[in-house]
Amino acid sequence: MKRVALFLLIGFVLLANSIGSHAQASAVLAIGNAAPEFELKDLSGQPHSLKSYRGKPTIVAFISARCPISNLYTNRIKAVADDYAKRGVNFVAINSSADESVEEVRAHAEENQFGFTILKDTGNVVADAYAAERTPKVYVIDGEGALRYRGRIDNSQNIRLAKQHDLRAALDELLSGNAVTNADTQAMGCVIQRVQNPAQSKTAKPATSKPATVKPATPKPATPVAAGPKVLPLKPAAYAGMVKASAGKVLVVNFWATWCGPCVAEFPEFVKLTDEYKSKGVRFVHITADDVSDLKKAVAFLKAQKSNADQFIQDTDDPQQMIDAVFKDWPGTLPATFVYDKAGKMTFHRLGIIDRDVLIVEIEKALKQ
C-alpha cells in the first residue's frame, strides 16, 4: 500500500495574505500571458534580468535551502537543469525566503553543487509577482517571454512514487512546438516565508503561526501503528465516507504534520477543544501529513499531547487527489481545518492556523443547525 502525505514545512506569512496575492497575480499570470519581468542579484552580487534569457525557453524555479521538500527534489532539479540545458533551455533558481540569508543560500548551493544560477529575491518581490507560495514551484517561460507552465515538478516528493513528470512533459511539448497539455498544476511544498507586515500579524495566533502547504509522501504501513494512539490510513475516496459516518454530529477535520510548525503550535488548542466539545456532539478528526519514516514521531507527538481525537494518515499516490476530495479551492496549505454540520455539509474552512474564538463560534453555529 502506498500513501502520500499532505505537505510542507513552516510557512511564515498569513494565509489570507498569501491567497490574496495568489488570486491577484493569477489573473495577471494566465498561461500564455507575458511573465513578469524582474532583475535580481545572484549569490556573487551580479544582476540578472529575465529579459536577458529571452530567445530560449527558461525554467524559473523557486527553491529553498531549508525546506525539506525542496531539498528532496535537489537531484531532480539538477537533472532537469542539466538535461534541458543540452536542448537549449535556460534554468534559473530563485530563493525568496525572508529567513534565509545570502550566506546560507550560498552554503547550501555549494554543498549541493548546484551548477545553475541562483538569485536572491530580497523582500519576496518576485515571488509576489509570480504568486509563488511554496518551494519547490517552477515556471516555464518561452523564448518570447510568455508563461507556458506553472506548478509542480512531479507528483511526489518520494522519487520512487513519482509517476507524473509534469515539468519534463511540459518542456518536451514546448520544445516540440506544441501547446502544453497540463499547463497549470498544484505545487506541493513549503510555504515561502514573506517579509511580515506588522499590521497583518494582528490576526495571527500565535505571532509565529503561519501556514504550511501540502507535501507529497512516501509509502505507509498497511496496518495501524501499534504503539501509542491508533493512526488509520485514509484514502481520498474514503474521505466522503468518513464525513458521512459522522452524520448526526458536528465534524471538525484538521490536516496537520509534526514538521509543520504552525500545526504543532495550534495543536494544544485542538486538544482542549476536543476535551470540551466531544461530549457535546462534536467529532474531532486529525489527518497527519507525516511521511511513513516519521510516523513514530507523529504517534509520539499525539501521545504526548494526549489527544482524544480520531487519528488518520493520508493514503494516496497524489496529494491532489485528497485536495479534490476535501475542497478543490484548497491550495494545499497546512494546517487546514474544515467544519461540517450534522448533515455533513461543510460550513467553515480555515486554511492556515486557527483562530480559536472564530472556530468556537463556527462549532456552536453548527451545533444549533
Image (cartoon, rainbow, N blue to C red):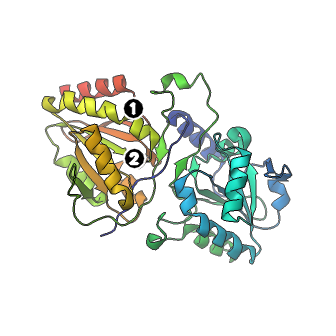
Residue 193 picture quarter: top right
User: In the rendering, at what x and y percent does residue 139 appear?
Assistant: 65, 58
Of the 4 image quadrants, the one containing the N terminus is bottom left
Residue 352 picture quarter: top left
Crowd rating for badge 1 (residues with CA inside 10 Å; few <14, some 14–19, many 20+): many
Sequence-first tag of 1 and 2: 2
Identify residue for label 2.
Answer: 258
Count of numbered badges drawn on the protein = 2
Relative to the observer, which residue lies in front, 319 or 20?
319
Left or right for 22, reference 238: right
Q: Amino acid at mark 2?
A: Thr
- When the figure is inspected, residue 173 is found, relative to residue 269, above or below; the finding is below
Left or right for 44, reference 105: right
Distance in Å between CA atoms under marks 1 and 2: 16 Å
Residue 351, visible in the rendered structure: no
Crowd rating for badge 2 (residues with CA inside 10 Å; few <14, some 14–19, many 20+): many
Of the 4 image quadrants, the one containing the C terminus is top left
User: In the rendering, at what x and y percent does residue 90 appear?
Assistant: 76, 66
Left or right for 217, reference 190: left
- When the figure is inspected, residue 219 is found, relative to residue 344, above or below; the finding is below
- When the figure is inspected, residue 195 is found, relative to residue 301, above or below; the finding is above
Left or right for 200, reference 175: left
| Dot 1 and dot 2 residues touching (CB under 8 Å) | no
Residue 61, visible in the rendered structure: yes
Secondary structure state at the residue bearing disc 2: loop
Please give the name of the residue rendered at 26% of the width and 40% of the height, measured from the top-left corner. 345
Secondary structure state at the residue bearing disc 1: loop
Relative to the observer, which residue lies in front, 67 or 39?
67
Please give the name of the residue rendered at 34% of the width and 36% of the height, measured from the top-left corner. 267
Q: Residue 179, which numbered label?
A: none
Identify residue for label 1.
Answer: 354
Badge nearest the viewer, 1 or 2:
2
